[in-house]
Image (cartoon, rainbow, N blue to C red):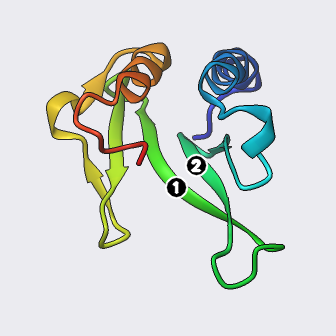
Amino acid sequence: MAISEFEIKRYEKELDKFIDEHRPPVHVRDQLDINYKIENQSVVLFEIRANFRNPSEKLDIPIAKATYVKTQKVWKIYWQKSDLKWHEYEPVAIVKYLEEFLNVVGQDEYDCFFS
């Protein structure tokens, strides 16, 4: 079952706030920016970068994901390794609230999310 419309609106507020706080300076946003998408039970944060081979083309590169497990009422945190697969974020694999996920990503204590 997908996240409700009410929850989506609340999450979008928190996600927009996070994006505003962590976006690169305006003068580099055509080369590097960040954004999010909500898909089913997951929130995915991603970088938007110019394609190395074709700078006019943009690539979305996922950096962090949180999936809500409704039966447990928790968010599971994942990061994408160089193998392009999602792996549980071992230091903090589970949080209760989306805001906690955003705090973990924002702190990026182990340099797993932002390069």
Position above or below: 32 against 19: below
Position above or below: 78 against 20: below
Give me the disc on residue 96.
Answer: none
Q: Position of residue 64 (x, y in %)?
A: 44, 44
Give me the disc on residue 62.
Answer: 1
Which of the two residues, 66 or 112, is positioned nearer the viewer here?
A: 112
**Disc 1 element:** strand
In the image, taking residue 53 as reference, residue 82 lies left or right, namely left
Callout 2: few (<14), some (14-19), or many (20+) C-alpha neighbours within 10 Å? many
In the image, taking residue 92 as reference, residue 68 lies left or right, namely right
What kind of residue is marked 2? Phe
Give me the disc on residue 46.
Answer: 2
**Disc 2 element:** strand
Which of the two residues, 57 or 7, is positioned nearer the viewer here?
A: 57
Q: Are marks 1 and 2 in contact (CB under 8 Å)?
A: yes
Q: Position of residue 111 (x, y in %)?
A: 29, 40
Residue displayed at 30% across by 73% down: 83
Give the image quarter of residue 26: top right
Give the image quarter of residue 28: top right
Q: Label 1 vs label 2: CA separation?
A: 4 Å
Q: Position of residue 100 (x, y in %)?
A: 40, 15
Residue displayed at 76% across by 44% down: 29
Q: Position of residue 21 (x, y in %)?
A: 63, 18
What kind of residue is marked 1? Pro
In the image, taking residue 8 as reference, residue 56 lies left or right, namely right
Residue displayed at 47% across by 23% down: 102
Question: Mark 1 vs mark 2: which is more N-terminal?
Answer: 2
